[in-house]
Amino acid sequence: MKKILYIVILFAQTAKAQGEAELFVTNDFASGEGIQLKWIYEYLYHPEGFNVYRSSESASWTKLNTTPIVPRKSLPDGHGLNKEEADLHAALIASPYEDLKVSIIRAFVLIKSIYSNEMAGYSGIMYHDKTAQKGHKIYV
């Protein structure tokens, strides 16, 4: 199996709100399509969202997402979260943003998001790049 090298940069929606985020990148082993990006931001998510950009070595940057990545305010019908995850998502949405930096809810959401891509997606801390190809060096 070929290894894929990725350098990933996440941008907050506004320059004022930019901050550092820890990033995790993995192949999408379930579907075999592209890569999955998950990140941890200081407050878990950013209220104005994140944008993800990609470039090859000599190409210009291309924005991958069409709208900023933010937590979903409500879960859709038929979501795949279990009761505990759904309750955590509800607590996340109900929590004041400023409290998340020191909130135990942040810790539990992060732990669940490591194992659940769906939880990470609904929490606004994941992007699935289905167009990333094996054997290509890209910058995201």
Image (cartoon, rainbow, N blue to C red):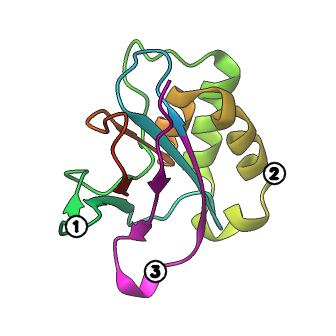
Of the image marks 3 and 1, the number of the one nearer the N terminus:
3
Instruction: Give percent across and percent down for residue 121.
Output: 47, 37
Foreground mark, 3 or 1, reads: 1
Q: For this rendering, which residue is in front, 57 or 37?
A: 57
Crowd class of label 3 (few under 14; some 14 to 19; many from 20; radius 10 Å): some
In this rendering, the answer to whether 56 lies above or below 92 is below
Q: Is residue 125 left or right of residue 140?
A: right
Question: Regarding mark 1 in the picture, which secondary structure is present there?
Answer: loop
Crowd class of label 2 (few under 14; some 14 to 19; many from 20; radius 10 Å): few
Instruction: Give percent across and percent down for residue 80.
Output: 50, 15
Q: Does the residue at mark 3 contact the one at mark 1 (Cβ under 8 Å)?
A: no
Q: Which disc is residue 17 wearing?
A: 3
In this rendering, the answer to whether 15 lies above or below 28 is below
Find disc 2 in the rendering and name its residue.
104
Q: Does the residue at mark 2 contact the one at mark 3 (Cβ under 8 Å)?
A: no
Instruction: Give percent across and percent down for residue 42.
Output: 65, 68
Magenta region: 1-25
